[in-house]
Every structure is written in structure tokens, then in C-alpha cells.
Amino acid sequence: MRFFRAVGLIFLKDFKEEIRRKENIAASFLFAFLSLVLFAFALDPTRVDMRQTGSGLLWLIILFAGSLFMGASFRKETETGTLLALLLCPADRSAIYIGKFLVNLAFLLILEALLLFFAFLFLDFRVAGALPSLALAWFGVTVGYAALGTLFAALVAQTHGGQVIYPILLFPVLVPLLIAAASLTQEAVSRGISLQNQWLRLVLLFDILFLTASTFLFEYAVEE
Amino acid sequence: MTLRRWTVALWALAFVTNAAALGLIFGYAPIERQMGAVQKIFYYHVPSAISGYVLLFLAFLFSILFLWKDEPLYDTLAYSSAEVGWIFITIVLVTGPIWGRSAWGKWWVWEPRLTSALVLWLMYSAYFLLRLFSRNDARTARIAAVVAIIAFFDVPIVHKAISWWGSIVHPVKVTLEPAMRKTFFVSMLAVFALAAAFLATRIGVALAEEAKLQREGGR
Amino acid sequence: MAGERVILSAEGLDKRFGHFRALSGLSIELREGELLLLLGPNGAGKTTLGKVLTTLSRPSRGRLLFRGEPLGEKNRPALRQAIGYLSHQSLLYGHLSAEENLLFFGRLYGIGRLQERVAELLREVDLEEARGRLVGAFSRGMQQRLSLARVLLTDPSLLILDEPYAGLDPEGSRTLTHLLARLKAASRAILLVTHELEDCLPIADRLAILHRGRLAWSGEAFGLGLEEARRLYFQATSGEAGS
């Protein structure tokens, strides 16, 4: 029980902190919006079939904007040594990981919802009717993204040049998720997704595998 | 001392087997009907891929051992294996297109196995970039180990995802005549010997570097 | 005299960072009601020792005993619960208020009567007025006082303080010394890492001098004068480390 309590406390503390900080959220969300607009300029939405191209595009934006946000999740804890304070607590250290993972997951989901809305507005990306399938698919992919994103953020927090290395380390490992996300999005808006969908099962496998592995490896990532 | 002996022995073995393999490839194995002589690169391409994967698996194992036992030797073994593995994956990425050009007419095609190798190359390049950025930081070894472990867990998933992603061309199915099969067997041994020799050498160099650092910085 | 109960002891600690040996064969004991002063030149391993004792770092070799029991999965949480750590970093969240910081850590440690305790402590360190202000806006002195409050909040049996006098004005130093004396009287074990001998030598019970990762000297500090202590220090840290 102490474990879940710790997770809850860390989640709430971090959520509150990010909202007060504003800088990580602002940078990330603004970057996502900017990317959307840039893609409109680069691609001419009147001539491009957004349902085909849009799926992959949106996920590229989520990857980049998301990494801006997640990359900072542990760096800020090294500024005043609060990571040490957390490590000193009697609670299981993986509670720190899970708490942070949940915060990243929450903000990513908010980012994605906003992005979908603006994609509809600016790029005429219609998803009406497909929303439930899309939500399921996107949630699954985001869990995997947040799981590894949080672990890698812990890894590079105290590395010289960590901000630069973070996406280079993270993105190749996420290739299966990106492919799955693009395929699932496309299928969701065109035909709909059944629960037997092979991509969904891949995403589930990815999530379980990497959430477990990260929880276990986290301690090694943050030890002094 | 024993490592040096092993290294020499492995290079001798590599020399012999590679000489034999090259001899067989150009003197014995028949020229493939469709692709011509360029197909022969297959004899080095495929075993390089296998060697690369085996070495990366070793890097994975050594990384786990390093985290578990906290012995610096395991970290040395891990990054040596990763480095040689990366070299062989690079060989795959270079020989693949050469073969591909004659098979499909283009330098690069998004063929599933080649594409997977590309993603692998990216993952391990990042591994080395990480080590580059934080030279002799003790913490780096642990971080690198975690990365190597995650990367390797990802390998089968990357494969599955990319093969479903669809390819413009299907992986080339090569049917081997007996003569080709024998040649292939020898070339496999040759490449494995080469990989082992490289690995032994790399480990030797790494240990020497570390011994020097230890004399300079330790107590 | 100080009590004999050993709260935390270390036996044969080695800590390697790659090729660098930060600690070699270090054994040390922290006893109830005793203040152990840890001295040593920069790079001697004082901070590393603090990190190993507080479980922030795993030793490469050697072991820790908590209240006589070897440290393992079972008693590690108990050790962490009993530790109060102060370092030169504030260990506080800049975007949370003073009160929020204390409440957060208090809840993580499962402290009872939390609201009361927090109010009490804020009064004690003279930060009651500033309780709702974000810590990021605090002066260094205020941050240090709050860090101290954070340490005292969990009522630790074992305090490990890494250079707590750094940056304190004379009055702040005096307050800290008084506080440490009170904690000693309440049977807390204190490990104090410092360069500033003048402030804490009077209340120190034992002295340990670290040099290049080894314990170069350790013994009674009771009645030790400043001059004598300085002499011991220079003696212990002048030679090459023994093999």
C-alpha cells in the first residue's frame, strides 16, 4: 500500500509542479501546434489525402513534441537534488518511476487530444465515428511511449548533453510503435479496428514488456 | 597472455577460413542465373548479419551481468561486443544495397530484413553516441548497459513490426544448390572466425586502455 | 559520555567508480547520542561515504549494519525512514511552497499529525510567514532553514550532514550548533562532514579523518582543542595513503 501511496503522491506533486512551471508544457504544446502549421505549409492539405498521410504525420509531431516534454522530467529533479530526496525515501524506488510515468502519460494524452482537435480544424482531419477505436489505439501507443520515454529521461538526466542525446537514443527503439500508430490510425479512420487487430496486440506486447523492464531497470538508471 | 594467444589463433583461423571461402566463392560456387556474379556478395552478407546479431546478443548478456555483478570487466566486454556487432551490421548495410542493386535495380529498397538492420544500426549508433558524450563517467557504463538491454529486447518487436509494415519487395529467397550450400557453410565459418578475431582484438585493446587508466587515475 | 548503542556501522567499505577508488576498506560506527566529525581534504571521499551510508550509492564491497543487522531488502526501508540527510543542495522543490514541500515529504515518510508538525517546524525555523511562498524565491538562508526543517520533520535517529555550515552567517551557525547539541541529547546519531572546525568541535564526541578514501585517523574528540585538531588533520593528510 505504501507503494501506491508513494506513486500517488509523486504523481500529484509532479503534476502540480509542471502546471506551475509552465515552461515544459508550453514549449511542448506550442511546438506541436507549430509543427502542425508547418506541415500545412509544407504539404498543401487540399491536395494531400489527410487520412492517408495524416496518421503518420500526427504521430511524428507527437514524438517530437512529447520528447521535448518528457526529456525534462528528470533533469529538473537534478537541479536542486530532489531526486536524491526521493531516493532517500523509504518507499520502493520504482514508485518514483511509475509516478513520473503516469505524469508523462497524462500530459501526452492531453497533447494528443489537442493535436487531434487542431488537425481537424486546420487540416480537415476527420475522425468522427472512429473516435473510440482511435482513442484505444492512441492510448495503447502512448503507454509504450511514456514507459520508455520516462526511463530514458532518467538515464540522460545527469549526462552531459543529455537533451541532445535523448531523442537519438529513444526514437529508434520506438520504431515499432510509430509504425503501429500510423497503421492503426489509418485503419481506425477508414475501416475501424477490431480487438483482434494484430497491431493492437503488438502494442500491448510492447507496453507490457517495456513497462515491466523499465520498472525493473529504473533503479540502475538513477543510483549514484 | 592467454587472450593474446587466443587472438593470434583466431586471426590465423580467420585467415585460413577466409582464404578458403574466397577460393570457393570465386572458384567453385556457380554463378547464379538471375543476378549474376554480384549475388556472391550473399556469402558475406548473410553471415555478417548473423554475426552482428550474435554479438549484439552478447552485448546484451554482458550488460545484464554488469548490472548484476558491478564488475567493470563486464562493461568492457559489453561495449566491445556492441562495437564489433555494430561494425558487422554496418557491413550488412553496405553489402545489402550492392546486392540489391543487381537484384532489384535500386540501391536501397525497404526490404524487411535490411530495414530491421537499419533500425538496429540506429539503436547501437545511439549507444555509442551516449558513450562518446560522457567519456569516462562511471555512471555512463550503467546507463549504457540499460540502453543495450532495452535495445535488444526491442529487436524481435522491430522485426515483427517491419515485416507487417509491408515491403515493396519480399525478402529474396535464395535456393541453394549443393555447391552453393557448401560454399555458404565455409563462408559462414569464415565470417564467424573474423568476428571472433575482431572481438578478441577489441577486448584486448579495451583492457589495455583500461589498465592504463587505472594506473593513472586509481589508487 | 555518549551512549554505546550503534545505530549504523560500515565494515570494509570499498567504492569504485569505474577505475577510481573513492573508498578503500572503510569501517565506521555511528552511535546514539554521539556526534562524529568527519574531516578530510576535497576528494577524500567524504561525500561518497555519506552517499553509501544513506543508501544512495551501493558499495562495491563491504557491508552496512543497521542496528546490528546486516542491511538487506527487509530493513533498508527502515534505515531510510531513520535517516535525515542534509547536503549543499537544498533537496527542495522550487515550484512548491515551503508548506507544500514539507507536506509532500511528510506524507511520503508517513509522518503522523502532519499538519501540526509542519506548522510547528515552520515556526521553529522562523519560516511561518513564508510558508505559502514558492521555495524558488527563497534566499539561501531561508532555503537552508527549510532544508533543516525537512530533515527534522521525519524525526530521524540518524543524521548525516554534508557541509551544513557552508554559507551560514555567524548567527545561523550558532543556531545550528545549538540544534545539534539538542539532537545529541535526544540520543540521535550524527555524522557531520565539514571544513569548519570552530563551530562544531566543542560539541563533537569523536573525530575521523579521511584521506584518499581511507580512514587516516579516528578517535575521541572530547576535549580536543582547535590547534590540536588542526595538527592531527595535517598529520593525517600529509603523507601518501598507506598501502
Image (cartoon, coloured by chain):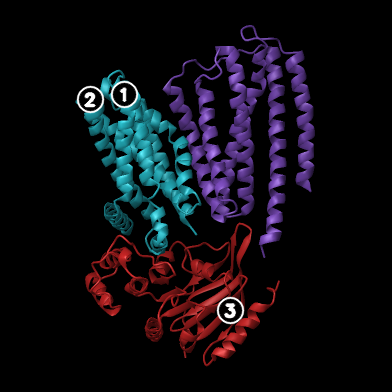
Q: Residue furthest top?
A: B33
Q: Which chain is red in the picture?
A: C
Amino acid bearing label 1: Gln
Q: Chain of mark 3?
A: C
Q: Nearer the viewer, mark 1 or mark 2?
A: 2
Report whether mark 1 lies on the same chain as mark 3.
no
Residue beneath the point at 46% across and 23% down: B163
Label 1 and label 2: CA atoms lie apart by 11 Å
Q: Which residue is mark 3?
A: C209
In the picture, residue A167 is in which quadrant?
Answer: top left
- Please, is residue C97 above or below residue A38 in the view? below
Tell me the purple chain: B
Q: Residue at x 68, y 20 (%)?
A: B184
Q: Using the image as rendered, state which of residue C14 and residue A153 is in the foreground.
A: A153
> Mark 3 to mark 2: distance in Å?
71 Å
In x, y percent, where is residue A65?
A: 35, 40
Same-chain status of marks 3 and 2: no
- Circles 1 and 2, Cβ within 8 Å, touching? The answer is no
Residue of label 2: A126
Q: Are marks 3 and 2 in contact (CB under 8 Å)?
A: no
A80 on left or right of B151: left
SS type, badge 2? loop
Q: Nearer the viewer, residue B205 or B188?
A: B205
Task: Examine the image and state in which quarter residue A67 appears.
Answer: top left
Q: Which residue has dot 1 on it?
A: A186
- Indicate the secondary structure of the residue bearing disc 1: helix
Q: Residue C140 appears at what percent x and percent y?
A: 37, 71
Foreground residue among B213 and B113:
B213
Indicate the position of residue A47 as horizontal and vertical percent values: 30, 18
